[in-house]
Image (tube, rainbow, N blue to C red):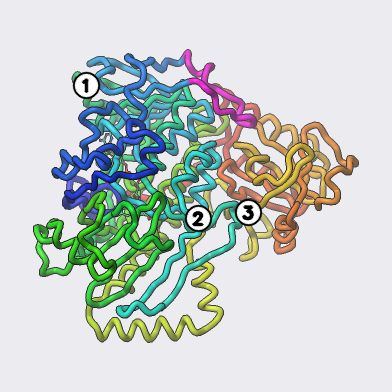
Amino acid sequence: MSEPSDSAPDAGGCDIDSTGPGVSAAGLGGANALGPKRLGLDSMQRGDAGQGERGLNGAEQDDAGPSGPGPASVVPQGADQRDSGAVDFGDRSFGAESSAQVTSAAVGSGSFIDVDVVIVGAGPVGLTLANILGGYGVRTRVVEERPTLIDYPRGVGLDDESLRTFQSIGLIEQILPHTTPNQFMRFVDGKRRLLAEIAPTDAQFGWPKRNGFVQPLVDAELSAGLSRYPHVEVVWGAGMNSATDSGDRVSIELATETGTSTVSARYLIGCDGGRSATRRQMGVSFEGTTSSTRWLVVDLATDPLGHPNLEVAADPARPNVSVSIAHGIRRFEFMIHDDESDELAEDPAFAQRLIAPFIPHPDRLEVIRRRVYTHHSRIAGSFRKGRMFLAGDAAHLMPVWQGQGYNSGIRDAANLGWKLAAVVTGKAGDGLLDSYDLERRKHARAMIDLSTMVGKVISPTDRKVAAARDVLVRAAAAIPPVRRYVLGMRFKPMPKYEQGAVVHTWSRTTKSAVGTLFIQPRVDTREQSNVLLDEVLGPWFAVLCWNNAPRRVLGDTAFGQWKALGARFFEILPVNQLHWTGHDDPDVTILADRGGALKKWFDGQQDSVLFLRPDRCIAGASIAQLAPELSADLLRTLTVVPGGGPDAAGTVLRLAQPST
Ligand SMILES: Cc1cc2nc3c(=O)[nH]c(=O)nc-3n(C[C@H](O)[C@H](O)[C@H](O)COP(=O)(O)OP(=O)(O)OC[C@H]3O[C@@H](n4cnc5c(N)ncnc54)[C@H](O)[C@@H]3O)c2cc1C
């Protein structure tokens, strides 16, 4: 089913059908720790957010933005700023200089700005992408129609891939305090007897697989992180009216407090949520379905239960969810029956009545927020059209049951960010950007399907159907391999790119790791001990050889090409060989496999030479002798230009784009 954009769903994977009153004055300890101005959360704390939309945006009345109003005037981002922001990708640093965070009042009416990339929407996806581009020195402007960040609670589950991306943008230390690691998920029946449990304990990508988090606080950290980049600017209160792709640039008209202004950019990325105006400008469909069920979501401060983890009750009387997240917050979610009106769902007494069976004192609740949501399962017909792209909820919406809406958007940003940086700095041809849709679509689709399926399993209200489901689930869970499969969350679709900015060689077998994410164990170098692998690999391409010297394996030509591209080179050795100097090369770092995870990984493969992309996807892999040929194929496929530069033109591989 295709839906006209005007009636397309709202942000967050869910319609915001109503705003619940009842904000507690108790507030959030975590919010205090960071300062309400920065967080835009004071509406929660003041308890003045109970008045519909006005209450929702209570903080907007006096906050110019999450980091305050910033400089009084906009710093124009002309071409002459490129040098100040440009950094060597192989040695990306996070500067101390400030980016501008301004209100649209500071943008003169009729003004014209020229940048490399415009991001529409300062949600988590737009902000993450801006941080990635900022780190690569790309002149970026984020335009956000709201005066502040969205402060109402939405996402509660972060995965290991998102944390790895936050690590890559240098914000992991700021974000971790708003997360709870190892948030396990229990499915129970109507009598609260265990049906199935998801409790993965490994951390192959460097971080726990399931983490509770407070979305507004993490989003605020993403916003604050932009202050490191003088070449990134966020304009609050500037909504995109229209966008025109003239072939070599996109022109974006903004509605500001003082009138309209125009931004011209090489690329426009629509991170503007479920009701994306960018998608409308692109004329792209948003295929899928909208669930007929509504859910009441209530967030409480000073968690009245206090126990960790997440319980999904497939109770035919009323399916419900109870989740512990960081900073003493508990979320309850309840399915609303068809015969229960919207007015009833919005009544504070109704929420209290639904929560009452779970706690002894329902009269002592500290309600942060209540909202009614509807779930959508939708995907945009194309993630790219000309110079315009879609990312996050603008590109795909999914029910919350796997907690993957936010995480899927962060995956988009990680996939697109380095490609945009490579193209706008002349290190790669525009064709590289076609791989974004090719790589992300299939995976986003798989997440939508999984989330929709889980929703169907937990939500039957017919007692016979629910009883039959319980019998089936219990029987399956009694089979040890099935139980382990669910427990370890091995059903989660992981990215594996068959097509795109990857090269599959002779080893293209089911065992080939090409197109998947490389693991992130802890390693030693001669200078550092017990560090996460990505910290050593750096933010750009990396060439890894197990037990071989990269220059000898690649040959001088290929080695020189990757070096010119800014890649780093690593020879991985068992930890006992760390100080052996026989292969020393000034361009190569010796990596010691301190816990044996790397040897175990290579043991399971046929290949020993890896070319890693900046997003840590394995772009190509081969045995040592085939590395020079693979290198040549990769440079062609990635359309990268060793040496690069604004005037360089690469061999552009045209990848077919899906039709809209
Ligand atoms: C109840 C609930 C629970 C959830 N739980 C989880 C979970 O556990 N895990 C998970 O991964 N995800 C979860 N999600 C989903 C997650 O919250 C969203 O997927 C995520 O916020 C989407 O981020 P985004 O940046 O794409 O869009 P948004 O956060 O919606 O941001 C879009 C931004 O664009 C702005 N904008 C819109 N139009 C314009 C315009 N024309 N001009 C300028 N700016 C514009 C908006 O004001 C907004 O700030 C949940 C969502 C809900 C509602």
Q: Residue at x 47, y 34 (%)?
A: 131
Reply above or below: 265 against 654.
above
Q: Is residue 25 toward the left or the right of residue 557 in the image?
A: left
**Would you call the spot at circle 2 few (<14 residues within 10 Å), some (14-19), or many (20 or more)?**
many
Q: Position of residue 327 (x, y in %)?
A: 40, 49
Examine the rendering and report whether any part of residue 284 can be seen.
Answer: no
Compare residues 563 and 27 and report the one nearer the observer: 27
Q: Which residue is mark 3?
A: 519
Reply above or below: 531 against 262.
below
Reply above or below: 303 against 89.
below
First in sequence, mark 3 or 2: give its number. Answer: 2
Dots 1, 2 in contact, CB < 8 A: no
Question: Mark 3 and mark 1: span between their CA atoms?
Answer: 47 Å
Callout 3, which amino acid? Ile
Callout 1, which amino acid? Thr
First in sequence, mark 1 or 2: give its number. Answer: 2
Dots 3, 1 in contact, CB < 8 A: no
Q: What is the magenta range?
A: 80-97
Q: Is residue 64 toward the left or the right of residue 424 in the image?
A: left
- Closer to viewer: mark 3 or mark 1: 3
**Kind of element beneath mark 1:** strand
**Would you call the spot at circle 1 few (<14 residues within 10 Å), some (14-19), or many (20 or more)?**
many
Where, by quadrant of the figure, is residue 588 drawn?
Answer: top right
Q: Position of residue 368 (x, y in %)?
A: 26, 49
Residue 94, magenta (yes or no): yes
Q: Which residue is mark 2?
A: 181
Q: Which residue is mark 1?
A: 260
First in sequence, mark 3 or 1: give its number. Answer: 1
**Kind of element beneath mark 3:** loop
- Closer to viewer: mark 3 or mark 2: 2
